[in-house]
Image (cartoon, helix red, strand yellow):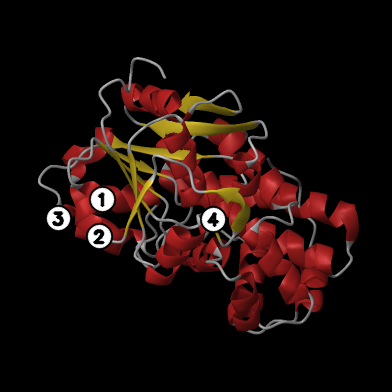
Amino acid sequence: MGDHFGFIMKIAYLGAGAWGFCLANLLAKKKLNVSLWTGNLSLADVLKKKGVHPKLSDHQFSEPLHLTTDLEEAIEGADLIVESVTSKGLRPVLEKVKRAACSLPPLILTSKGIEQNTCLLMSEVALDVFGKEYESRIGTLSGPSLADEVMQQLPTSVVGASRSLELALQIVDLFSTPFFRVYPNDDISGVSFGGAMKNIIAIACAIADGLGFGENTRAALMTRGLHEIRKLSTVKGCRPETLNGLSGMGDLCVTCRSTLSRNYIFGHLLAQGLTPKQAHEKVGMVVEGAYTCVSAIQMSNRVHIPLPITQTVHSIIYEGLDPRRAVKTLLTRAVKQEHL
């Protein structure tokens, strides 16, 4: 580990879903003192008894990782907080942290989503809870990174972003391993936005795949999906080049093709005729794209930027639109000049 994080004595890791468990293990294997918190008592029981995560059953719980269901215990004396809760659950968890903490250490966000109604990115939610003066102490980690592959130590590259270059470099030092490469970036909005929006496009691609529309269709949806992401990103002041990188195009490539992605699995189940509720239940995890597509449409309506792919996904999930008819309609829309 580099010099930047030499002061770290304790890391409070909030959220023990597949991604949280994965990254907490990565840090624990670097011999860091990690306290992993989950509010899911049944999950905590499984982790304690079996030493493996139900969604990552081939991988053992790493020492010296400490598991707790007590949030105050997790954050007590922490020099850093890392979170992997759901985008919907981020605000209530951070509000609990604010009430419980004597002082707030830097926060690294790994959740990918946009809060409904407020249309705030995860970094903006943290600012809203902790205050504007906390801005330089907020970072995010995002990019094409499936938990199962990271647990297998397969080569992975992601982005560590913060408006503070020092914190971005600290994220690089903290998480980097010989197989997990982290690139620094100061466009935290762009990194956060790309990671959130790609989940929606992944659902669209999975629906098309499940209906047998082929590689050409997926390529069209991914390319035009990235165009939608870039158009709407201007609302958040994101740099376009950020969305061409790992947290935009890179994450889009992985999520739109991988049968390990919960968003892809969800979309594929919709194509098979399951209702959104049935598909959610079968996935057994939060499908962030289904949550974030509501936020994206809310934002789109406010600024009058059309998002045809996102709107189609929203209509399938929340308005009962038939997936086959939806994809065909989407691909036969009036042709306009391609602007990128």
Label 4 residue SS? strand
Of helix, strand and loop, which one carries label 1?
Answer: helix
Residue 3 against residue 332 in the figure, above or below: above
> Which kind of residue does numbered mark 3 sit on?
Ala
Camera-near label (3 vs 1) is 1
Q: Of the residues under marks 3 and 1, which one precedes in the sequence?
A: 1
The image position of residue 16, as x and y in percent, is 43, 56
Q: Quadrant of the C terminus?
A: top right
Eye-nearest disc, 3 or 4: 4
Q: Residue at x 69, y 46 (%)?
A: 254
The image quadrant of residue 129 is bottom left
Q: Which mark is residue 74?
A: 1
Q: Name which of mark 4 and mark 2 comes first in the sequence.
A: 4
Could you say where residue 218 lies in the image, as x and y percent from the top left? 81, 54
Q: Kindly identify which numbered label has been placed on residue 100.
A: 3
**Secondary structure under badge 3?**
helix
Residue 302 is at least partly visible in this image: no
> Which residue does the numbered mark 2 point to in the structure image?
70
Label 3, residues with CA under 10 Å away: few <14, some 14-19, many ≥20 = some
Of residues 4 and 47, the one nearer the viewer is: 47
The residue where tag 4 is placed is 52
**Along the polypeptide, which appears first: circle 3 or circle 4?**
4
Q: Residues within 10 Å of mark 4 (few under 14, many from 20)?
A: some
Residue 45's spot in the image, x, y percent?
42, 66
Alpha carbon separation for disc pair 1 and 2:
6 Å
Instruction: Find out whether the residues at labels 3 and 2 contact each other: C-beta distance under 8 Å.
Output: no
